[in-house]
Image (cartoon, grey):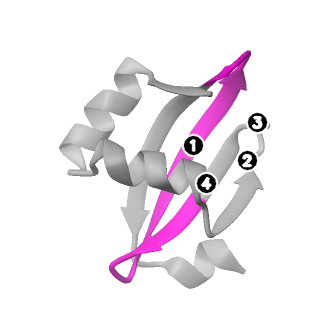
Amino acid sequence: MSIKFTKHALHRIKKRKISKDEILDTINNPDLLKKDLYGNSVAQKIIERRLLRVFYFSDGDAKIVITAYKTSKTEKYTS
């Protein structure tokens, strides 16, 4: 399955200094996988004491990354 990025996602991950490798690892090996209110998948992984959240949806054989961000509020999103 291929992983693609929207222009918005590319802009945000560059601005937030998140590597594509971190995103790929989070999607392929999440600590937790949830759905948001719109039905998008949210893959979550703790990296260096911060929680990386990657929002994406499936389109055929591809996963399309919408956005991603890191947060220190791990308990808010993991419980």
For disc 1, the marked residue is 55
Residues at marks 2 and 1 touching, judged by CB atoms closer than 8 Å: yes
Q: Residue at position x 66%, y 76% from top?
A: 78
For disc 2, the marked residue is 36
Residue flagged by tag 2: what amino acid is it? Asp
Residue flagged by tag 1: what amino acid is it? Phe
On the image, which quarter does residue 62 sit in? top right
For disc 4, the marked residue is 43
Residues at marks 2 and 3 touching, judged by CB atoms closer than 8 Å: yes
Magenta segment's dominant SS is strand
**Quarter in which the C terminus is drawn:** bottom right
Percent across and percent down for residue 2 are: 55, 25
Residue 12 falls inside the magenta stretch: no
Looking at the image, is mark 2 or mark 1 nearer the viewer? 1
Q: Nearer the viewer, residue 65 or 11?
A: 65
Percent across and percent down for residue 40 are: 71, 38
Mark 3 lies on a secondary structure that is loop
Residues at marks 3 and 1 touching, judged by CB atoms closer than 8 Å: no
Residue flagged by tag 3: what amino acid is it? Tyr
Q: CA distance from mark 2 to mark 4?
A: 10 Å
Say whether disc 3 or disc 4 marks the residue closer to the N-terminus. Answer: 3
Residue flagged by tag 4: what amino acid is it? Ala
Relative to 38, is 27 on the left or the right?
A: left
Q: Residue furthest top?
A: 60
Residue 59 falls inside the magenta stretch: yes
Magenta part of the chain: 44-62
Q: CA distance from mark 3 to mark 4?
A: 14 Å
